[in-house]
């Protein structure tokens, strides 16, 4: 029963991540791009929280790695807020995408 729920959770999180990543890079409108970016940055932090809280309390190294992937999403937000050019927004989108992808790999593979 529990493994079935984990499979459902994995599928839902994977679908959200893939659709979010596609929207992040394929949307053309500025409003849509910003909305997808902020959603993916927050999603990266949620994944980091889920990953870090899934480890036992004595697995400090693994928890720090998970929080590091969440920190990438925070850095993406800072780059977006502080940067004013289109290149800084692209950098922020790549950082948010990396946070989500690395977080999902860390949560379900490692």
Image (cartoon, rainbow, N blue to C red):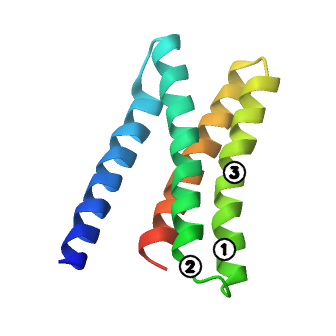
Decide: is 44 above or below 79.
below
Q: Which residue is identified by label 1?
A: 63
Res 6 → quadrant: bottom left
Q: Which is in the foreground here, disc 1 or disc 3? A: 1
The answer, for residue 78, to whether it is visible in the render is yes
Q: Say which residue appears at 64% left-offset and 45% top-offset.
A: 95
Q: Earlier in the sequence, mark 1 or mark 2?
A: 2
Q: Say which residue appears at 65% left-offset and 82% top-offset.
A: 57
Disc 1: CA contacts within 10 A as few (<14), some (14-19) or many (>=20) = many
Q: Earlier in the sequence, mark 2 or mark 3?
A: 2
Total count of labels: 3
Q: Say which residue appears at 69% left-offset and 39% top-offset.
A: 76
Residue 104 picture location, percent across and down: 46, 62
Q: CA distance from mark 2 to mark 3?
A: 20 Å
Q: Which residue is identified by label 2?
A: 55
Decide: is 66 above or below 17.
below
Q: Which residue is identified by label 3?
A: 72
Residue 55 picture location, percent across and down: 56, 79
Q: CA distance from mark 1 to mark 2?
A: 7 Å
Disc 2: CA contacts within 10 A as few (<14), some (14-19) or many (>=20) = some
Q: Are marks 1 and 3 in contact (CB under 8 Å)?
A: no
Left or right: residue 100 compared with residue 4 = right
């Amino acid at each position: 029963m529990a493994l079935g729920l984990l499979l459902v959770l994995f599928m839902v999180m994977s679908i959200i991540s893939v659709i979010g990543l596609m929207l992040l890079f394929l949307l053309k409108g500025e409003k849509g791009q910003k909305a997808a970016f902020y959603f993916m940055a927050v999603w990266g932090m949620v994944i980091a929280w889920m990953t870090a809280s899934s480890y036992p309390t004595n697995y400090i190294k693994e928890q720090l790695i998970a929080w590091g992937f969440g920190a990438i999403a925070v850095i993406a937000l800072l780059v977006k807020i502080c940067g004013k050019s289109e290149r800084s927004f692209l950098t922020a989108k790549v950082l948010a995408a990396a946070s989500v992808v690395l977080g999902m790999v860390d949560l379900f593979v490692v």
